[in-house]
Amino acid sequence: IIYFLWYDLLMFLICVGIVAWVVSTRPEFDLDDWPVQHAVFSVLVLCGLLSAPFFVFTLPLLQRVLTHTIPTAYDRKGVC
């Protein structure tokens, strides 16, 4: 699981770097410029696609093996 965390950190830093690079190429660092907005949207899509390896944690049979957790009697509101 630690490798998933390092992977996620690396992909996050790459995405932030892409946005920072696009902002640095704009005159006067204008954040309302359309290329910056396009880059932010594209990085959001890219970040979503790069989170695909975490899909295995949602599979019912593998979730228990990978996370070593069991369901409790509490619901989403914390009521037993």
Image: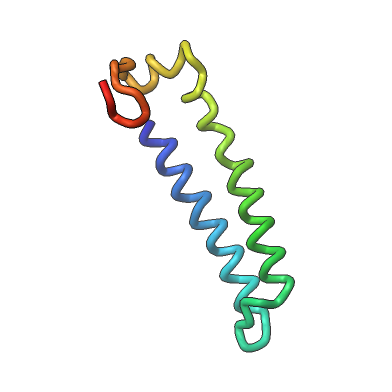
* Residue 73 as seen in the image, left or right of residue 36: left
Does residue 67 lie above or below 53 as drawn?
A: above
Quarter in which the N terminus is drawn: top left
Q: Position of residue 28 (x, y in %)?
A: 62, 88
**Closer to us: 7 or 36:** 36
**Closer to us: 30 or 18:** 30
The part of the image, by quadrant, that contains residue 63 is top left
- Outermost residue on the top side: it is 61
The part of the image, by quadrant, that contains residue 4 is top left
Q: Position of residue 13 (x, y in %)?
A: 49, 57
Residue drawn at 26 percent across, 20 percent down: 80
- Outermost residue on the bottom side: it is 28
* Residue 53 as seen in the image, left or right of residue 46: left
* Residue 59 as seen in the image, left or right of residue 73: right
Q: Position of residue 42 (x, y in %)?
A: 68, 56
Residue drawn at 60 percent across, 43 percent down: 48
**Closer to us: 70 or 50:** 70
Q: Please name the colour scheme applied to the rendered image.
A: rainbow
How many numbered dots are placed on residues in this image?
Answer: 0
* Residue 18 as seen in the image, left or right of residue 67: right
Q: Position of residue 12 (x, y in %)?
A: 50, 53
Does residue 35 lie above or below 80 as drawn?
A: below
Residue drawn at 62 percent across, 77 percent down: 31
Residue drawn at 59 percent across, 48 percent down: 47
